[in-house]
Structure formats: structure tokens, C-alpha cells
Amino acid sequence: METFIEFITKKEVIGTVITLFVAYISYHLLTFVADKFIIKSKTEFEKKRKRTVIELLKAVFKWLVMLLAIIVILDMFGINVSSIVASLGIASAVGALSFQDTLKDVISGAAIIMDNYFVVGDFVRFGDFTGQIIEFGLKSTKIMNVDGEVKIIANRNITEVVNLSQKAASAMIKIPTAYEEKSAKVDKVLEKVVEEIKTWETVNQTKTSYLGITEFQDSSVTYAIRIYCSPGKIWAYKWAALRLIKEQYEKNKIKIPYNQIEVHNARKK
């Protein structure tokens, strides 16, 4: 028991505990202050931009705190820190070629912020993948689509991206309708649907509209409406609109055609 007490009361052990505690408190204090800084933003765009920069700075600060804590702890145990630092300098020069991609990621991350490609919370399209920026780090960016799938992209590979949050998102909804339905009746029902959609939050009342007949198919007439709203709402509103249209079609007994298969059994002679 005395041996254990002597061990935990050594200056190296106490110093290590204090160093780790200070490092932990320092990092979380920065996080707290940073979050308060974000809250004071005047606009949503400013808030998202600040959050993106701060998330990047948090990653840098975390590694710096860890590195400094390790150096302090090693110094307390009598290890020559100066020689280690000097060795790290030489090793970094030698290892630079091995970490070229990492350096490219960091530089590209800085360029994304400076050139305002996107910020955390923006909706973007990268290739054939569309989703929301949920995390932006030193090395990579994470995008999550409507199905919850997360695409992780190295920052150096983000050369072209379409930012959907810098303008209102839109969706055209096509509604196949049976030929025997009167156009005037369908027009009246879908115009009522559009008026309901215009009451939804962030929907652009001026641009959102009923487009009328857009196509003649083999077994149906295609009517369409277009919704304009904030990017974050577009998928939810599209699903809600489809449900509303089906409910109104059922209420007004308007048919939506679907494929049917007729089976003929030959009679036995």
C-alpha cells in the first residue's frame, strides 16, 4: 500500500495527471467559446461559415494540444525533448514525400474555405451524389444523402462541386392521370394542391406553380407542378406533395393508371 501511495505521489505521476487535465479543459473551453461565437452570427450563412472554419480549427487545436501534452510529459520523465523535436524536424523533411497527399488535403481544405465552395450544412452535388455537408475536416469532407448514406471525399479530390444551397432548390412532380379524366377537373384539384403547398414554410409562393399538361403517354396524361423552397426542405416537401396529390385524387375519384396484366386460360376441348 505504501509503495502505491509513493508511486501516485511522485511528481512525474501528478504532473502527468495535471497536464492531461489542463489539455482536456483547454480543448473543451475552446469548444465552448467557439460555440458561443457561432450563436452570435447575424445570418444563417454566416453561422454555417463560422461553424466550418471553427471545425477545422478544432481539429488543428486538438492535435497541437496532444503534441504539447506529450512533450511536457516526456520532459517531466527526464527524456531529452530537444533531441526528439530536432529528430522530428529531420523526420518531417524525410517523410514529406510520403505525406504529400495529406498535405494536399490540408491545402485543399483551406482553399475550399477561402473560395467559399461550401460550408457545413450546405446541400451539394458531387458527381452523381447529392446530399448535405455534415462534416468538414483537415483531410476529408463528409456528405450525407437523403437515404442516410455518407460519402467521404478526400479534400484534394474536390475540384468540382455544385452548391445547391446558394439558390432555391426546386423539384418538378409529374402526375400520371387517366385519359378519361376531364382536364378541367384535374386542373382544379392540382391548383388546390399547389395553393396548399404554398402555405408550407420556406416555399417560394411566387415561383411554385401548377404547370398543367406536360406529356401524353401511352396510357396516361402527365400533369406537373414545380416546387421552389430552401434546399434543406426539398425532399421532405416532395414526399409530402406526392402524398397530398394521392389523397386529393382519391377524394375526387381521379384515376392514376397502372400496368395491368390480363391472363387468358385456354378452354379444354
Image (cartoon, rainbow, N blue to C red):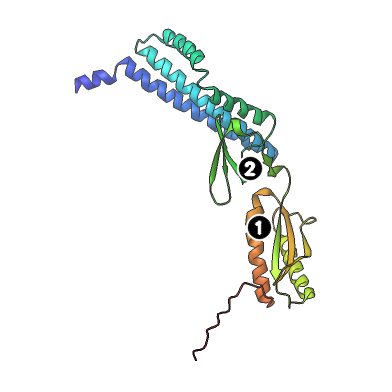
- Residue 97 lies, with reference to residue 233, above or below; the image says above
Q: Where is residue 14 in the image (x, y as percent from the top left)?
A: 34, 19
Query: What is the three-letter code of the residue carrying label 2?
Result: Gly
Q: Is residue 25 left or right of residue 235?
A: left
Please tell me the numbered disc located at residue 127. Answer: 2
Q: Locate residue 210, reporting x and y percent.
A: 77, 63
In this view of the protein, which residue sits in the foreground, 37 or 255? 255
Label 2 element class: loop
Disc 1 target residue: 237
Q: Residue at x 30, y 16 (%)?
A: 10
Crowd rating for badge 2 (residues with CA inside 10 Å; few <14, some 14–19, many 20+):
few
Q: Is mark 1 on a helix, strand or loop?
A: helix
Give the side of residue 36 with respect to residue 82, left or right.
right
In the image, what residue occupies the spot 69% across and 76% down? Answer: 254
Viewer-nearest of discs 2 and 1: 2
Tell me where residue 47 appears, x and y as whole percent.
65, 37
Res 41 visible? no
Question: 95 or 35: which is nearer to us?
Answer: 95
Q: Where is residue 31 in the image (x, y as percent from the top left)?
A: 53, 31
Q: How far apart are marks 2 and 1 (CA)?
A: 24 Å
- Which numbered disc, 2 or 1, marks the residue that appears first in the sequence? 2
> Is residue 87 in view from this perspective?
yes
Residue at 76% across / 67% down in the picture? 191
Question: CB atoms at circles 2 and 1 under 8 Å apart?
Answer: no
In the rendered image, which quarter is residue 38 located in? top right
Among all residues in the image, which is located at the extreme left? 1
Residue 79, image quadrant: top left
Q: Quadrant of the N terminus?
A: top left
**Dot 1 amino acid type:** Tyr
